[in-house]
Image (cartoon, rainbow, N blue to C red):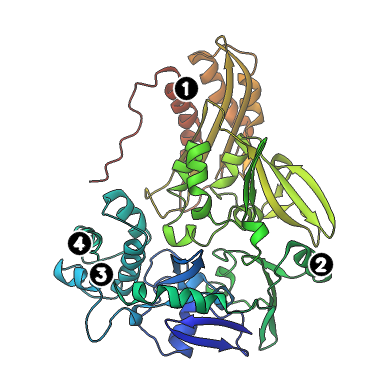
């Protein structure tokens, strides 16, 4: 059974298929059709809803893609859809802002924009254009254009008024805290187990090594929404507090279930290049669900986190039953979508340097600046002393069947003077490291040229930091 608040209605579901997404739950089970299905893959934002979770004495609001979120994620939270915003016959201030600023034409995408604006308003004290753009980057509109919607964001944030959610916040927090932990949701021959501790997770995964681990689900849910497959047994890990913790000691230890939006402030402080790239990792809705552990365990060759962690020489803490082992990330990816994880073994946490190396840089090349998958992602970490390269970590995504260190390139750099001749020799060595494929994102030749140019860009960034190498306009 799962228990949650549907706006202010306490809702219990005892016989609900755990493969059900929030989108289908709202539309088919609750008759709430304001939430729209656009892409069923988390790319368009038409299905955006908001989850509120007790955090201290207040509520933390997160926008999520309903099409990629399984219903088990609702337990202990408040689900808010566009139908809940209107109060006593009056539009909510974010809805009114969309009307006043002419932010809607056909209206299909509008509910998703409204919910992203609602979440932005709840998480803002004043209007910041860049923050608004980040909040809305995962919502696509085909007819209105974004200027009036940005205007609506400005009006909503500058003219914020207390709403019914603010007035009921204390009561909502109390009701959420009264919800007891859940252990399982099952129906239609499918089960999702909800362990509350790492020890219980380890026991269950040993017992059911065929189960699929469910963290944010932003990739796993595609098997249901895009491939129309059933997931007969899942083990959810997002409710395990220990797996969401982050600790900084000799190394930075990030729990595998910590969401990307949760770790973003920390990475911006200690690994700025990582934090900056994280701003372009999918969209806010995905970052609110997706986890660093899940991004690695999926072993996608175009996962954005892996090249950066490889260049930082990160390691994984793995757990199998009561046993733990530490594995360098460079030994984790074996083949396309294959990892060194043994049956019943899972990622407990990710270990990386407590502070970013001085010359660590990373860049992502994609068709769109935001809310897009990489064609090539490159990460570079050289140790340069007295003009000589003493150590080199160069890693790429999108260039092979797995995220991969460029060993020939690294060998061409180490022990050499850090100059243009060495750099050009290293770019040619990349041809030995990779034979990239051609697909709808990029051709093989384009990928190789981009990978080489990213290394040249790194050289310029270190040797001529005053040179402008990137132009990004947020106006």
Is mark 2 in CB contact (under 8 Å) with mark 3?
no
| Residue highlighted by disc 2 | 203
Crowding at mark 1 (Cα within 10 Å: few <14, some 14-19, many 20+): some
The image quadrant where one finds the N terminus is bottom right
Instruction: Tell which circle, 2 or 3, labels the residue nearer the N-terminal end.
Output: 3
Question: Element under label 1?
Answer: helix
Between the C-alphas of marks 4 and 1, the distance is 44 Å
Q: Which numbered disc covers residue 155?
A: 4
Q: In the picture provided, is 132 more to the left or to the right than 373?
A: left
Q: Which numbered disc covers residue 60?
A: none
Q: Nearer the viewer, mark 3 or mark 1?
A: 3
Q: In the picture provided, is 86 more to the left or to the right than 456?
A: left
| Residue highlighted by disc 3 | 94
Instruction: Tell which circle, 2 or 1, labels the residue nearer the N-terminal end.
Output: 2
Between the C-alphas of marks 4 and 2, the distance is 51 Å
| Residue highlighted by disc 1 | 459
Q: Report x, y in % for residue 419.
A: 50, 13
Between the C-alphas of marks 3 and 1, the distance is 46 Å
In percent of the image, x 54 and y 59: which residue is there? 290
Between the C-alphas of marks 2 and 1, the distance is 49 Å
Between the C-alphas of marks 4 and 3, the distance is 8 Å
Question: Element under label 3?
Answer: helix
Instruction: Tell which circle, 4 or 2, labels the residue nearer the N-terminal end.
Output: 4
């Amino acid at each position: 059974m799962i228990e949650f608040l549907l706006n202010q209605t306490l809702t219990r579901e005892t016989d609900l298929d755990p493969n059900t997404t929030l989108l289908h739950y709202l539309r088919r089970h609750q008759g709430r059709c304001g939430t729209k299905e656009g892409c069923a893959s988390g790319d368009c934002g038409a299905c955006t809803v908001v989850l509120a979770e007790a955090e201290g004495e207040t509520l933390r609001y997160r926008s999520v893609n309903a099409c990629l979120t399984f219903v088990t994620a609702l337990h202990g939270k408040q689900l808010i859809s566009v139908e809940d915003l209107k109060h006593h016959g009056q539009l909510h201030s974010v809805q009114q802002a969309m009307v006043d600023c002419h932010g809607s034409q056909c209206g299909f995408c509008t509910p998703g924009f409204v919910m992203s604006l609602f979440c932005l308003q709840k998480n803002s004290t004043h209007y910041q254009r860049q923050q608004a753009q980040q909040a809305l980057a995962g919502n696509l509109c085909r007819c209105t254009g974004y200027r009036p919607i940005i205007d609506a964001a400005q009006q909503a944030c500058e003219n914020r008024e207390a709403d019914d959610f603010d007035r009921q916040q204390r009561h909502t927090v109390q009701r959420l805290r009264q919800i007891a932990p859940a252990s399982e949701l099952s129906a239609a021959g499918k089960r999702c187990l909800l362990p509350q501790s790492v020890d219980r997770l380890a026991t269950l995964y040993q017992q059911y090594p065929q189960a699929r681990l469910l963290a944010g689900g932003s990739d796993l849910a595609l098997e249901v929404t895009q491939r129309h497959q059933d997931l007969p047994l899942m083990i959810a890990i997002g409710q395990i507090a220990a797996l969401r913790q982050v600790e900084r000691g000799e190394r930075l230890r990030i729990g595998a279930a910590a969401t990307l939006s949760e770790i973003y402030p920390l990475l911006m402080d200690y690994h700025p290049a990582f934090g900056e790239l994280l701003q372009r990792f999918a969209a806010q809705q995905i970052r609110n669900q997706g986890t660093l552990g899940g991004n690695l365990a999926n072993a996608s060759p175009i996962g954005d986190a892996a090249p950066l962690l490889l260049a930082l020489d990160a390691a994984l803490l793995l757990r199998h039953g009561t046993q733990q082992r530490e594995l360098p990330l460079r030994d984790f990816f074996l083949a396309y979508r294959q990892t060194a994880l043994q049956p019943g073994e899972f990622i407990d946490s990710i270990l990386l340097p407590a502070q970013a190396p001085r010359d660590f840089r990373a860049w992502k090349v994609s068709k769109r600046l935001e809310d897009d998958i990489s064609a090539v992602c490159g990460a570079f970490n050289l140790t340069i002393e007295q003009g000589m390269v003493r150590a080199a970590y160069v890693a790429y995504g999108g260039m092979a069947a797995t995220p991969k260190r460029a060993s020939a390139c690294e060998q061409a750099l180490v022990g050499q003077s850090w100059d243009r001749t060495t750099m050009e020799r290293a770019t040619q060595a990349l041809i030995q490291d990779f034979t990239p494929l051609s697909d709808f994102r990029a051709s093989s030749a384009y990928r190789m040229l981009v990978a080489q140019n990213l290394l040249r860009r790194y050289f310029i960034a270190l040797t001529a930091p005053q040179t402008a190498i990137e132009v990004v306009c947020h106006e």
